[in-house]
Image (tube, rainbow, N blue to C red):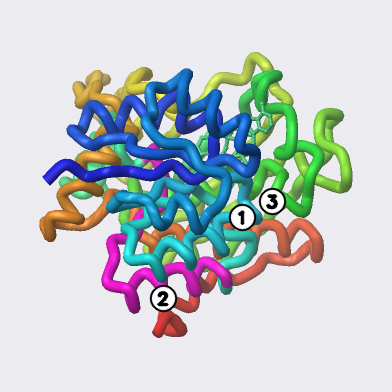
Amino acid sequence: MTVRWGLIGASTIARQFMIGAVRAEGGEVAAVMSSSADRAASYAKENGIPAAFSTLDAILGADIDAVYISTTNELHLEQSLAAAKAGKHVLCEKPLALTSADARKIVAACKAAGVVMGTNHHLRNAGAHRAMREAIASGRIGKPIAARVFHSVYLPENLQGWRISKPEAGGGVVLDITVHDADTLRFVLGSDPVEVSAFTQSAGMAAGGLEDGAMCIWRFRSGVIAQSHEGFTTRFAGTGFEVHGSEGSLFGRDVMTQKPVGSVTLRTASGEEELTFDRGDLYARSLGLFHKAIDGEGAPSATGEDGVWSLASAEAALQSARTGRAVAVDPKLGEIA
Ligand code: NDP
């Protein structure tokens, strides 16, 4: 069956990555919705999408099987709940909502409706991160002890809008990037965070009280401690992901990105080894697994519950930055009916 997708949000991420990913995985981009009828029409034309709508009811009433939600963050809750109610499968962008309590509502609604729900955490689909996860799980670094995540970038000018000016739209680097780091740490380490301590800053780009830089220290259930650095304002920092264990260290370089690039080096007593890994498109893999889940096979690469975890982690980081104390991370998954 060809999955017919409706795009909720005439966004940059859909245009740059997700439309191509849907098509690469045999899906059809059947419709797009924007809050502006003109934008919907021009976006549809530019991207070869047959139908354009300017209301949620209209796109949910169209002949589509699934929605990909990539509007600004404050809209994800209402749009996901409506899509689930209309019986559409839901692939939603991170953060799933502005609070983890709202994210749990989305997951519960999708469960009740019997539709597949996924969170678009692309980094789990990167060959580099999967190679690191496998190396750790197969004991190649011995007992994991510590991790370091370098994910401070320069926000491209075309994206310097709501992310740095609108708290009400869920702006700020923590909801934008820390959610990804929390998810990737959980995925690579195979363990959940239990507490976080964070400092945030406004280093000159963000306004309205929003943060454009964050440093977090995490403690995981396994005993691993980790540090992560997220930012919008550093042009030359580069990205990386390291995990250090009793018998070896993994160095991922240039791997906190949307493209299947970068390198992973394993250093042990025997020397250094470059790990080889799958260089496939991250977003296409996410789509492929989502399509399989619709067919009843497996689960999306990041589920709704994973999205609750990452948002609960980011929420705890923000609370820590506000209060100056370490904060427990608790996704309260048991509250999902
Ligand atoms: P954009 O700013 O490109 O799009 C968000 C919304 O802004 C759109 O839905 C659109 O509203 C409106 N908009 C976009 N361009 C214009 C314009 N030129 N004029 C007027 N309005 C415009 O956001 P992103 O694509 O960067 O992010 C969207 C979502 O995706 C966020 O939730 C973000 O966190 C997530 N994201 C995830 C990534 C990942 O790798 N997983 C990467 C990047 C973003 P309307 O639809 O009403 O027209």
Q: Would you say the residues marked 1 and 2 are in contact, meaning their CB atoms lie under 8 Å apart?
A: no
Q: Quadrant of residue 318?
A: bottom right
Mark 1, mark 2: which one is toward the viewer? 1
Mark 1, mark 3: which one is toward the viewer? 1
* 243 horizontally vs 38: left or right: left
Q: Amino acid at mark 1?
A: Leu
Q: Which residue is mark 1?
A: 75
Where does residue 42 sit, x and y in percent of width and height? 55, 24
Where does residue 5 sit, x and y in percent of width and height? 33, 43
Ligand 1 positioned in quadrant: top right
Q: Amino acid at mark 2?
A: Ala
Tell me the residue at 61%/55% (across/down). 75
Tell me the residue at 51%/42% (across/down). 53
Asked whether mark 1 lies closer than 8 Å to ligand 1, one says: yes
Tell me the residue at 50%/58% (across/down). 57
Magenta region, residue range:
102-123
Q: Which residue is mark 3?
A: 170
Magenta highlight on residue 296: no
Residue at disc 2, secondary structure: helix
Q: Would you say the residues marked 2 and 3 are in contact, meaning their CB atoms lie under 8 Å apart?
A: no
Closer to the chain start, of discs 1 and 2, is 1
Residue 297 visible: yes
**Quadrant of the snapshot with the C terminus:** bottom left
Q: CA distance from mark 2 to mark 3?
A: 22 Å
Where does residue 3 sit, x and y in percent of width and height? 22, 45
Residue at disc 1, secondary structure: helix
Q: Which residue is mark 2?
A: 108
Front residue (pair 190, 163): 163
